Amino acid sequence: MYQLLLTRRYLFSKIMPLLAAVAVLLCTAMVLTVWSVMGGFLTMLIGSGRTVTGDVMIAWPNAGFPYYQDLVQRLEKDPAVEAAAPMIESFGLIALEDGRKETAIIRGIEGESYARVTQFKDILWWKPLAKPLPKDKHQLDPRLTKIGGTTWEQIYNNGLSLSRADGPTGAPQPAIVMGIEVSGFNSRQPQGFYMPTQRERTLPDGRTQWVDQFMPRDGKVMVNMAPLDSSGKAVEMVSRQFPVANEFQSGVFEFDQKFVLMPLGACQEMLKMHAAKRRVKVAAEGPKVVATPPGDESFDEPETKLVDDPARVTHVLVKGKGDLGRSGAAEELRRRCEAIYSKFARDHKGAVPSDLSIRIYTWEDQNRTMINAVQKETALLLVLFLIISFVAVFLILAIFWSMVAEKTKDIGVLRAVGASSGGVAAWWVAYGFAIGIVGATLGLGLAWLIVTNINPIHEWLGEKLNIVIWDPRIYYFVKIPNVVESEKAMYVFFAALIASVLGALVPAVRAAWMDPVKALRFE
Amino acid sequence: MAAGLYKTYRLGRVHVPVLRGVDLTVSEGEFVAILGASGSGKSTLLHLLGGLDRPDKPTQAARVCQHCGYDLKGAKKEQCPECGGWLTQTTGRSRIEFRGTDINTLSRRALDRYRATDAGFVFQFYHLLPELSVLQNVVIAAMVRWGVGYLAKSASCNREAAVLLEQVGLAHRLNHRPAELSGGERQRVAIARALINEPAVLLADEPTGNLDRKTGDAILDMLLAVRAKRQLTMVVVTHDAVTAARADRVVRLVDGRVVGE
């Protein structure tokens, strides 16, 4: 009991325990702030990784599989599945109006079903904006102003339907939606919005003129794709020009720089994956699309037959019910999809890949490399800061060591009135614990203040001192994560307490083993 | 009863014999003054009696010349090679007997309990805890004694402390800090602290040594009054013959030996 009384009385009676509490406070605030911001980045990144993929993907790359409508129906009947959408993913080459050719990942999608599975509606960039972005104080975002000849609403709807009124008739034509970074015609501003750039165009008479590069209005892109035969060889190169309906920003630079979305039907046609009569090799047990090993074509050509070849897709994207954004949350849905596909494969035996061959993976599996990288960076930063914070342990040790020296006589008095050496040690440990409680509590408060106000602080630093740490032109967010998770706060709090007690432990042992007679004679 | 008490301190490489075989018997309720010059070993004797320190074992004591402190390293010599003094081989064993128990044989825990319940200390320099109030300085001894059990006794302990402080004339100073008190008042607080656990023996180390004559006399009067009221056994260490004269019996200590009563 005397330990509590002494701890209470000594806690703020001197400057030294205050310094120890401040050390704990600063370390707690530092670790929690870094963890919250970096953890927020990770959550943001993981969320971004799901914006264009859904929760689970069923994939048979390049060749694709038929009867996907049946699979989508089976999936959507399952209570765990919110929606499913067919998709083709293939490589392509796009030719831009300024003559550049860029490799791209072409995704053939149905706008409506893709929007139900992914966050397609939200990631379309060019759309009406109700209010400016947080950093756009002067409302310079072009989406806030009127656009000549068309409306933002129309451009947005074009994006959703993957079409654009084009040509002399003005009838809707299949159009593409590109990642915002694909064309290189959009310049990201410090406020976080994009400004279409202008490019110099040479006229037939040799003169040049500057033209607007706002792609969703009148931009067109030539898409080149190579359909493959059943053996995986490119049959021919297919080229088709598409108007640009809109552009998207998923939050993942890799996606925004490489992905081009086009209508599923157009994609199927270009890749020869649409429904058609096709000549296929006939196997002994009946007509069947079979792969011919490369190099075998010239020998014993098997008999072929003209059959109705159904349309194919390479992927079916699945969105589960509820939020499956947590790590491991989509695993159960993946197992459900495996079971559903297994039955689907049995029912279409020979026509679709077997359940052992098909690839079924979660959004987490797909983004594993990216997630692991950020997780490792976060862990590395945390370890670094924890090592720095370990200094606090030694600081408390040093402060307590000198406090024990200062209170030597008090220790002698306590021993004289019957205090045991264990009791004296418990007093100093309790003292360290109390300092930890005070420091860690205030540290949590400080971290909460910093994190919740990190955006105004960051802006203030930028305005007054010209220090911009997270420049939206470089980083892919306009707002720094500003949420302190209670679980993380709890871990940091208890770590701070343990550190404080550890720091007090050695001085406590020293106090406990002090000779009471020498302590009483201490001057 | 204390018998055959030896104590040698080591200062660097030199052994300093402080007690060289002290025998002392104090009856219950007796007031014994231990009179001696500075360095005669009287405070050390008090610490041994109060269980704050333990005496040397006779075998340890025998290894050191009790005249000059020369380390004999266990050699069985009769004459010290350093000072030439003739050695007296110590025999038997040192004992500090309190109500039939040799406190030398007590465990650390039991010795702590002995200090908490049976012996009360009063020091020359008061040794109050500066951050605590007068009342808390007294109550803390009860807290140490009762441990967690203090929770149930806090009201009675606080009441007892207030009564004691009233008896020593400090009822109006309960919430003051030691720094706000005079030397005499501090010593009264120290006496109240020593008495809160109702010890059988009060061990006072120069209780008036840091006070002027008048205040010192008042403190001594108070101690005698308390002793009479509580039937306390009192051992007071002093170098002041006037203080010693008020004791039932005076034991003179010279160079760590009792030289006369």
Image: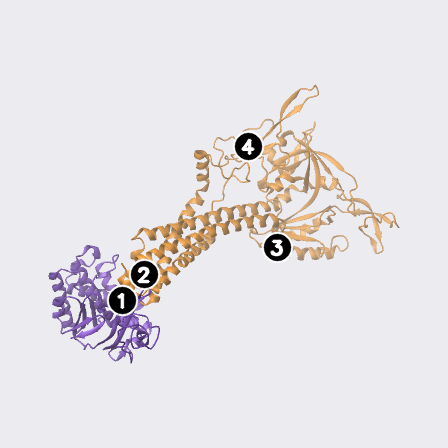
Residues packed near mark 4 inside 10 Å, few (<14), some (14 to 19) or many (20 plus): many
Identify the mark nearer the N-term, 2 or 4. 2
Please name which of the two marks, 2 or 4, marks the residue nearer to the observer.
Answer: 2
Which residue is at 55% across, 28% downward? A146
To which chain does the residue with label 1 belong?
A
Helix or strand or loop: what does disc 3 sit on?
helix
Q: Is residue A490 left or right of residue A80?
A: left
To which chain does the residue with label 2 belong?
A
Disc 3 versus disc 4: distance between alpha carbons? 38 Å
Task: Name the residue type under label 2.
Answer: Leu
Residues packed near mark 3 inside 10 Å, few (<14), some (14 to 19) or many (20 plus): many
Helix or strand or loop: what does disc 2 sit on?
helix
Identify the mark nearer the N-term, 1 or 4. 4
> What letter labels the chain drawn in orange?
A
Please name which of the two marks, 2 or 1, marks the residue nearer to the observer.
Answer: 1
Circle 1 sits on which residue?
A: A416
Which label is found at residue A333? 3
Task: Name the residue type under label 4.
Answer: Arg
Residues B172 and A331: in front is B172
Report whether mark 2 lies on the same chain as mark 1: yes
Residues A422 and B3: in front is B3
Disc 2 versus disc 1: distance between alpha carbons? 19 Å
Residue B79 percent location from the top left of the image: 29, 75
Task: Name the residue type under label 1.
Answer: Ala
> What letter labels the chain drawn in purple?
B
Residues A405 and A166: in front is A405
* Image quadrant where one finds the N terminus of chain B: bottom left
